[in-house]
Amino acid sequence: MKLTLDKDLLIEGINTVSKAVSTRTTLPVLECILLTAQNDTLTLTASDLEISIKSAPILADVSENGSTAIEAKLFSEIIRRLNGDKVTISVNDKEAIIKCGFSEFTVMIQPAEDFPDIPEVEKEYSYKLKQNDLRDMINSTIFSVAMDESKPFLTGELMEFKKDRTNVVSVDGFRISYRSQSTDNEKESKVIIPAKTMREISRILSGNEEDETEIFVTEKHVLFSINGNTVVTRTIEGDYIKYEQTFTDEYKTKIVLDRAEIISSLERASLISRDARKMPVKLEIGGGKVIITSQTEIGKAYEEIDSVTEGEELKIAFNPRYLIDALKAIEDERVTIQFNSPLGPCIIKPQDGDLYKYLILPLRI
């Protein structure tokens, strides 16, 4: 294999696929990036057997077709530090020679045939989403994915493709995050995708309002096509919880308040609650105000916020981080929070519509 190509384009491809390189493996080839040169293009591939990423074809002057696997971390660091615009890569049976400007590196390689094949995913039907919408949906829910692997299906995010909308949902046992986007889907489907995959996809997605991603779903794998890049991930088996039943429209207390103001107040109060699980912040609702207090052995905090209040007065306590995470994922200036009892969950939602919903369990006072 021998080719010459633009260094910046090569770095861009490395940045894309390196997200799938395995960091903990007994198989050396999984620590590599697979380089495939053919028909004046180079493609890069990485896989940790859970997620596989293949770059969009990179234009190159290919004088000899071929493929090889090079240790990803070393390859990335070499290419980034080269002083020049064009990189030449030539490969023999045992090593790759990388040249750029007056620099030359010789590195050991792994056989390309040892690299795992990307799973085949049927492209019978694709779901389409604007890339910036999908990125927002992931970033607005990923923080409440469960870390405990005793329930594997909660370590991923649920993607639901309904006729008129696509939903992304995460649950960690203490809170539920829901984000929705209007779409036109001919087929309905749902799948649980590992959190790691969703995080990496959010980093690959562009911010261009016109760019779309295509999603292909099978029983065991999902394929994301993003600007010519291909991401294939295994799915997580299991029945996701019936989260819809928890988002009730009934309430005994409802407040509408400024989102930025309550975030700032919660952050100040949480300075006193170093261990939010044991020392929560307390909310006292009534009389058109929300009083936020926190008290521990190191001190106490008092915050007061104006709100539009409807229903009964209420005293309730929360882990402040859970409230802050949800509120920071919202862009609306004002939000609605509904309560039913001091021991029942609160639901954060928009004043109009159902673009997002967040459910958070309280703590005992």
Image (cartoon, rainbow, N blue to C red):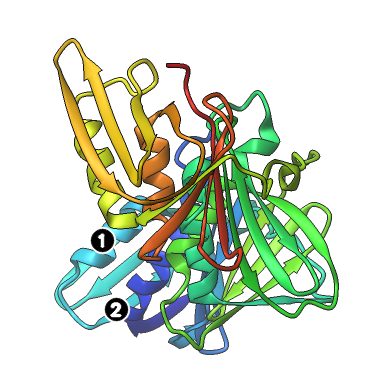
Location of residue 88 (image quadrant): bottom left
Label 2 packing within 10 angstroms: few (<14), some (14-19), many (20+): some
1 or 2: tag closer to the N-terminus:
2
User: Observer-nearest residue: 74 or 231?
Assistant: 231
Which x, y percent locates residue 365?
42, 16
**Whether residue 115 can be seen here:** no
List the residue tagged with mark 1: 78
Secondary structure type for disc 1: helix
| Label of residue 8 in the image | 2
Residue 155's place in the image compared with 51, above or below, is above
Which x, y percent locates residue 127?
72, 74
Q: Residue at x 32, y 43 (%)?
A: 289
Q: Residue at x 52, y 35 (%)?
A: 25
- Three-letter code, disc 1: Ile
| Circles 1 and 2: CB atoms closer than 8 Å | no
User: Observer-nearest residue: 129 or 180?
Assistant: 180
Location of residue 268 (image quadrant): top left
Secondary structure type for disc 2: helix
Q: Residue at x 61, y 43 (%)?
A: 251
